[in-house]
Image (cartoon, rainbow, N blue to C red):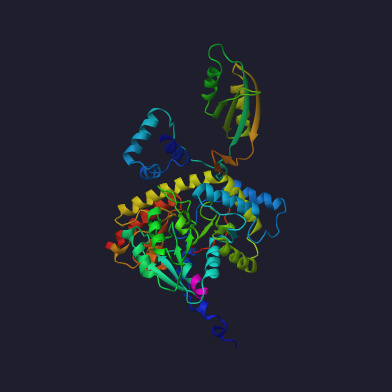
Amino acid sequence: MNDKLLALLEQDCTLSTEQLAALCDRSEEEIRAAIEELEEQHVILGYHAAVDWARTDREDVTALIEVQVMPQRGRGFDRVAERIWQFDEVESLYLMSGSYDLACIVTGKTLREVARFVSEHLSALEDVTGTATHFILKRYKDKHVIYETKTVQEEGFVFS
Amino acid sequence: MIDYTSVLAGTIQAIPPSGIRKFFDLLSGMNDAISLGIGEPDYPTPYHIRDAGIWALEKGYTKYTPNAGLSDLRRAIQTYLKRRFDLNYAWDSQILVTVGGSEGIDLALRVMVEPGDEVIIPTPSFVCYAPLVSMARGVPVQVETKVENNFRLTAQELRAAITPKTKVLLLPYPNNPTGGIMGREELEAVAEVLQGTDIMVLSDEIYAELTYGRHHVSPANLPDLYERTIVVNGFSKAYSMTGWRLGYLCGPKEIIGQAIKLHQYGIMSAPTNSQYAAIEALNEGDNDIAVMREDYDGRRRYLLAGFRRLGLDCFEAEGAFYLFPCIRSTGLTSDEFCARFLQEQRVAVIPGSAFGPGGEGFVRACYAASMHDLSEALHRLEQFLADLKK
């Protein structure tokens, strides 16, 4: 049941306990208990809305930064990753295979703000040996959500 | 000046206009209405199926296909029917690809029914059967099924409806609007009643993939019924492909052969693009169906629990994507209920009376809608029922 419950919540965390109970074919009590347990176990870490800021007045800039680092003896990449994720500008951080080590997604109000973050904070870390910054121009899809105005066909009210 | 009533055929003039047309016109003018009215999946066609249609267009596959349909599609239908329902139909003589299941129903009736022939139609059921029988100059004989029998056709009801003029028995299961299904046992009882007659069975199985808790059984699965059964199926409901207009008809080659003749003159061939998409659906779409079915099942339980919580008796539908709650406790007719529910709370459900005898006192709600809409519809229903009591 938990996998189904998690998939439903990941898709729409506003579903009510009653709705989740029907969708999982369980009682509301079972659903409440399962969610509580999943939260305690840190399987569920939070609940989010998918926001398309591009439709608001807020102007911001997002960049994907490839980061090369020198892993530390005994701690690998984790120590430096932790130092990077502490910055509020860092939206996401992943350890990667391939030609660089960490993928860091950073959001700032302006291009200059992101640039300053890279030059003053990220590159200043002694374990960081190189960065490559790619600015994100447009978000089409994120976590299965499409960020584009839906157009709909003319539908017939067909009695079927 | 031409008097058109004298020009138009009596058969078509005798068919009453759809009673709920007005209702839909009203609905289409409301922006904030929630529609649980239209029997249509709320998903778009799965992308890999759409992509197969796009691919066919890119390749320039835009000509007529063989009258009976692409041979690859008919082969795929043969394989699919065997795999999913253990049905045996030969692609080259027993399968015809049609423009939706509806064309299949029309063709099957027109190749069998002669003036005065009776066609038994269990009701409540989908609205097209009786008019199509009438257009074939047959006589629709509607048999009311009962909620206490889970809206199944009983042997007793069937026996009482048979006369020497009975030509066809229509079996609309899984049923729209009730959600009733016929199990093997009930079909065996039907087989027993039909034994020794020449009565044919036209089985509308458009919702065959959408059953909950148990697998669909076709009358054609019963050896005693196979030779007298014509199966209608299609892609609209199973693969969310309503707008592609594609279905198929399977049955004895003698019947299918005549249906192909009629189809070739009236239609020529089903849309080519849709046929290529349908091959993809049949070969690679089992998982899409499984996902949709599970999703519908969850919404079915949600809406059912909601109706019952609000005090409406409701048969636990076993198939299709409709619930058919009884609204007699409100003191309203099903027409009144639907008109007022739409006007006062802006939620559209369909009056049971539209589905023939036995439908009065019920309304049809389609749960192929988002959880958000279902939740809001229940909320508005609660308000509506409370207002009625004032």
In the image, what residue occupies the spot 53% across and 56% down? B236
Q: Classify the position of the N terminus of chain B by image quarter.
A: bottom right
User: Where on the picture, by quarter, is residue A70?
Assistant: top right
Q: At which x and y percent is residue B293?
A: 46, 48
Q: Nearer the viewer, residue A146 or B275?
A: B275
Measured as percent of width and height from the top left, residue B172 is found at 45, 61
Pick the quarter of the image with the C terminus of chain B: bottom left
Front position in the image: B52 or A28: B52
Give the residue at the far front of this rendering. B196
> Toward which corner of the image does residue B324 lie, by quadrant?
bottom left
User: How far across and down, in percent of the image, does residue B121 sit?
Assistant: 43, 67
Prevailing SS of the magenta stretch: helix
Magenta highlight range: B132-137
Residue A84 lies in quadrant? top right
Residue B261 position, x and y percent, is: 62, 67
Name, please, the residue furthest toward the left: B390
Question: As drawn, is B324 to the left or to the right of A74?
Answer: left
Q: Residue at x 43, y 30 (%)?
A: A43
Classify A42 as above or below B247.
Answer: above
Count of numbered marks: 0
B183 relative to A119, above or below: below
Residue at the top extreme of this rendering? A73
